[in-house]
Image (spheres, rainbow, N blue to C red):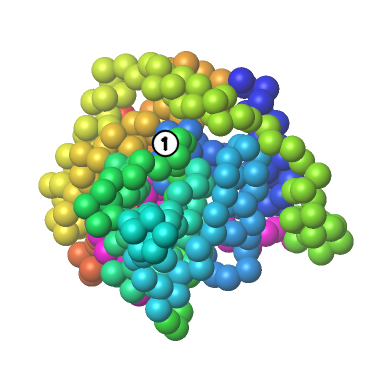
Amino acid sequence: MKTLLDTLILQASSILLGKRDVVRLSIACLLARGHLLIEDVPGVGKTTLAHALAHLLGLSYRRIQFTSDLLPSDVTGVSIFERNSGEFRFHPGPIFSQVLLADEINRATPKAQSALLEAMEERQVSVEGETHPLPTPFFVIATQNPGYQIGTYPLPESQLDRFLMRISIGFPNAEAERSLLKGEDRRQLLARFGPVFSPKQLLDLQKEVDQIHASEAIYDYCQALLTFTRSSSRFYHGLSPRAGLGLLNAARAWALLNGRDFVLPEDVQTVLPSVAGHRLQSGEGNSSDGMGLAKYLFESVAVP
């Protein structure tokens, strides 16, 4: 499996040039059964990364362009009366796929965004009193533009908390950008790659993540980080228990990517900015910068 993971990282990194760390964090998020939020300016490869991950993991893929007039039923599906049978029949929406790309999620109203809440937490959709299970595995990869751009709606805290990680891609370095300018279209290049994993192999890897050993010292460290965020006056509120579980699962996935069957404090520190940055609000009421938050926590909470 380690060889397959290395192949997955290599091929995804050849699509998103110069962003190996971003690719590794994205894969760790999916291995930890989490949903991924990619926030950045248009044109840096957010959609390309989502498409590449779905393709290389061998998963079914659907894309929804979130707009201000999007309705919840456009996401989940709707029951339509069929005259021949005299019954209502449920027509599944695009959310019934293994990977759902919610493109520019913050251009839709909170009402439309709320269509994802149950699906992201419980892997099911309730429509008109009936519950419909979603495919397994199921991931939401959402992209959003920076909040200062025109026509965006801030994601509610309940929606943000459903995402295990929020990452930013950023502009490529000069060497990667030159290769991008001189190379072929990224989607044409991706089409030459076959799936690295089957869905079953991915599920097996997720089970393997669950078996990665975390010592009592790692539990102490994670708990100390959570407690600090709840007691510090710098934040309006601290990290939730869901965030704590996500932090530990993400650290386990990062350890697996590095070929280890145990978690180190460095694993926790590596994933912490992506897991915690979007869940905390500073005293000024703005979302804390992930890297700045991580530095502050590293300095404030000692490793056991």
- Please give the name of the residue rendered at 65% of the width and 48% of the height, measured from the top-left corner: 52
Count every numbered label the image shows and give the total: 1
Q: Identify the amino acid type marked 1.
A: Arg
Which region of the structure is painted magenta?
A: 152-174
Q: What is the residue that sits farthest to the right in this orientation? A: 182
- Please give the name of the residue rendered at 39% of the width and 64% of the height, measured from the top-left corner: 83
- Please give the name of the residue rendered at 25% of the width and 57% of the height, measured from the top-left corner: 128
- Please give the name of the residue rendered at 63% of the width and 60% of the height, measured from the top-left corner: 45
Q: Main secondary structure of the magenta part?
A: loop
Q: Position of residue 202 (x, y in %)?
A: 54, 29
Q: Position of residue 283 (x, y in %)?
A: 20, 64
Instruction: Please determine whether, in this image, residue 228 is positioned above or below residue 293.
Output: above
Q: Nearer the viewer, residue 73 or 19?
A: 73
Q: Nearer the viewer, residue 197 or 223?
A: 197
Label 1 packing within 10 angstroms: few (<14), some (14-19), many (20+): many
Q: Position of residue 289 (x, y in %)?
A: 38, 59
For the N terminus, the quadrant is top right
Q: Quadrant of residue 221?
A: top left
Where disc 1 sits, the SS reads loop
Queried whether the magenta region covers residue 169, the answer comes back as yes
Instruction: Please determine whether, in this image, residue 186 is positioned above or below residue 6.
Output: below
Instruction: Please determine whether, in this image, residue 193 is positioned above or below residue 262.
Output: below
For the C terminus, the quadrant is top left
Queried whether the magenta region covers residue 262, the answer comes back as no
Q: Nearer the viewer, residue 282 or 69?
A: 69
Q: Going by the image, does 89 lie left or right of 100?
A: left
Q: Which residue is mark 1?
A: 33
Q: Nearer the viewer, residue 269 or 4?
A: 4
Q: Going by the image, does 281 lie left or right of 13?
A: left
